[in-house]
Each structure stands twice: as C-alpha cells, then as structure tokens.
Image: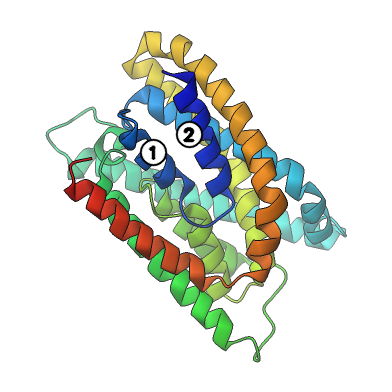
C-alpha cells in the first residue's frame, strides 16, 4: 500500500468527516480512482483507521462543547447517558441484524461472505445511498427552514428521539454513501431536536461506534488475511495521524460554516455526488 495514497485518502477523510456527505463514500471513490480495491480487508481496515483519526480530532475539538451541552448538571448528564446507551443499543440491533441478513440472504452463493466484500465496491449502491441521504437531509433542512418561526426545538434528547436516531444510524451501517452524520442529525431535527444538539449527539455516537468498527475489521482481516494485519497496521496508523491533522484543520473553519450554513444545501450536494458516482460506475470504475 503506497503511503502517498494513504496520505491522500487521509486528507479526503479529514476534510469530509465533519460534513454530512458520507466521508466513507468519498474515500471509497478516491480508492477506486487510484486503482485500489475498496473491498479488500486491508482497505476497509484503513478506512476504519482513518475514521479513528478524525474521531480523535472530533473529541479534541468538541470536548468543551460537549461539557457545556451535557455535563452542566447531573440531570442533563443522566439524560444524555441514557439517550446514548439507548441509541447505541438500537443501532447495534438494527445494524448488526441488517448486516447479517445481507450476508446470509442477499448473496446466497457466498456462504462465508462479509458485507464489506459484497457492497463496499459497488459504486451503483453508493450512488443510491448518497441519493437517499440527500433526500433525507433535504427534507430535514427544508422542514427546519419552515419551522424557524414556530416551536423552538428541544435542546435535550428524550428516549423516543434517541430511539429514532439510533435506528437510522443502524440503517447506515452496511451502506457506504448513506451518511451516518447526515442521517442521524437530520433524524434528530425531524424529531424536534435543536440542530446544534443533534450534531453534538451524532458525533458522540460516532465516538462510541468507532471502536466496535475497528474490532470488526481487525477480526475480518484476521479471518481472511493473516499476513495483511501486520502489513496494513503501519499504513493505517500513518493514515490515522494524517486524518487527525486534516480533521483538526477542517474543523477550524468548517464548523462555523456548518452552523451558519443552510442544512438543505448538504442534501443538494449529496444528490449531485450521487449523479457523479453513478456516472463513474457507468464509465467502468
């Protein structure tokens, strides 16, 4: 694995992670354009390591904001923890169940297949997932725009809202392009949660989800390619470092633009990206 490729992918991941445009889809498309196999265990482990780097950047950048949002008093902290546990549990049930169903029933000719092998290299599916995310973000953004003069959104998360956010996050897990942050934040907004609070909660969920994703990819690599683990950890750690640095730089200027921008524009971007990816698929990538 070329370190130049790893660094370029890390920069793509770092720049795209904060925005609800599916950083995974961007990285996979970049891998395909560079001639890399996005379904290989070493590539999916690299993708998770890149996410690890940007998640560390998110923790560093958002820690003070999380403290102000959720740690001001015992009641807020308790409500936050309950919502986090519930959403994560729902994500695990729906996401794991959906992954196992796809692996078992969608491709019966591959009895020991992994969902990464089946779906992650399919640019046609990535295009469809980007379109679905774009529609959801667009609906949430336009709904927010119409309701600005109406009821003030909630600043804390109740169990019903956490359930739906966790459910949508679970649906995102098998599909690259179905932006996890875009889906969870949009779901929170549609459920009546303040956008800034939905963003805080979405990134907190991602920090919990990342270690599980790393464990899954390490196990997959162990099962399918014993020698690949030793050779891919080095590039993966380099990628995580550069993704961390790129993520911090992006957060410095993207977060304010994200807060003052119009959410529905990200939906339009995802729809345009869907068309571009579909054209790349038609071109043979």
Q: Where residue 234 sits: x, y (%)?
A: 53, 15
Residue furthest out toward the left: 109
Disc 1 marks which residue? 30
Figure quadrant of the C terminus = top left
Q: What is the quadrant of residue 160 in the picture? A: bottom right
**Residue 136 has which mark?**
none
Q: Residue at x 60, y 55 (%)?
A: 202
Crowd tier of the residue under label 2, counting other residues whose Cα lies within 10 Å: few below 14, some 14–19, many 20 or above = many
Q: Is residue 186 at least partly visible in the picture?
A: yes
- At horizontal 40% and vertical 55% (from top left) the residue drawn is 178
Up/down of 71 relative to 26, above or below:
below
Label 1, label 2: how many angstroms apart (C-alpha)? 7 Å
**Residue closest to the eye, 245 or 149:** 245
Residue sitting at the far bottom: 149
Name the residue tied to disc 2.
9
Query: Alpha-carbon neighbours of circle 1 within 10 Å: few (<14), some, or many (≥20)?
Result: some
Residue at (52, 28) in percent of width and height? 7
Task: Please indicate whether residue 211 sits to the left or right of residue 63 in the image.
Answer: left
Task: Give the x, y percent position of residue 114.
Answer: 29, 32
Query: Position of 48 compared to 58: left or right?
Result: left
Mark 1 near mark 2, Cβ–Cβ under 8 Å?
yes
């Amino acid at each position: 694995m070329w370190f130049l490729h790893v660094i370029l992918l890390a920069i793509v991941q770092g720049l795209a992670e904060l925005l609800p445009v599916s950083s995974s889809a961007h990285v996979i498309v970049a891998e395909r354009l560079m001639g890399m196999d996005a379904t290989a265990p070493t590539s999916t482990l690299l993708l998770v390591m890149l996410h690890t780097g940007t998640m560390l950047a998110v923790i560093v950048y958002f820690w003070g904001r999380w403290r102000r949002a959720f740690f001001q008093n015992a009641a807020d902290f308790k409500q936050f923890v309950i919502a986090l546990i519930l959403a994560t549990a729902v994500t695990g049930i729906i996401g794991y169940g959906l992954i196992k169903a796809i692996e078992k029933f969608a491709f019966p000719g591959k009895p020991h297949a992994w969902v990464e092998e089946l779906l992650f290299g399919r640019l046609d599916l990535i295009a469809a997932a980007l379109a679905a995310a774009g529609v959801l973000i667009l609906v949430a953004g336009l709904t927010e725009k119409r309701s600005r003069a109406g009821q003030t959104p909630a600043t804390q998360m109740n169990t019903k809202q956490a359930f739906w956010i966790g459910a949508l996050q679970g649906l995102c897990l098998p599909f690259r392009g179905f932006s996890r942050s875009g889906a969870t934040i949009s779901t929170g907004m549609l459920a009546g949660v303040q956008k800034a609070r939905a963003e805080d909660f979405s990134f907190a969920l991602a920090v919990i989800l990342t270690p599980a994703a790393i464990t899954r990819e390490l196990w997959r690599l162990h099962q399918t390619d014993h020698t690949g683990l030793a050779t891919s950890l080095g590039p993966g750690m380099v990628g995580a470092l550069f993704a961390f640095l790129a993520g911090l730089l992006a957060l410095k200027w993207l977060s304010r633009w994200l807060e003052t921008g119009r959410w529905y524009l990200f939906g339009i971007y995802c729809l345009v990206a869907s068309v571009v990816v579909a054209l790349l698929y038609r071109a043979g990538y």
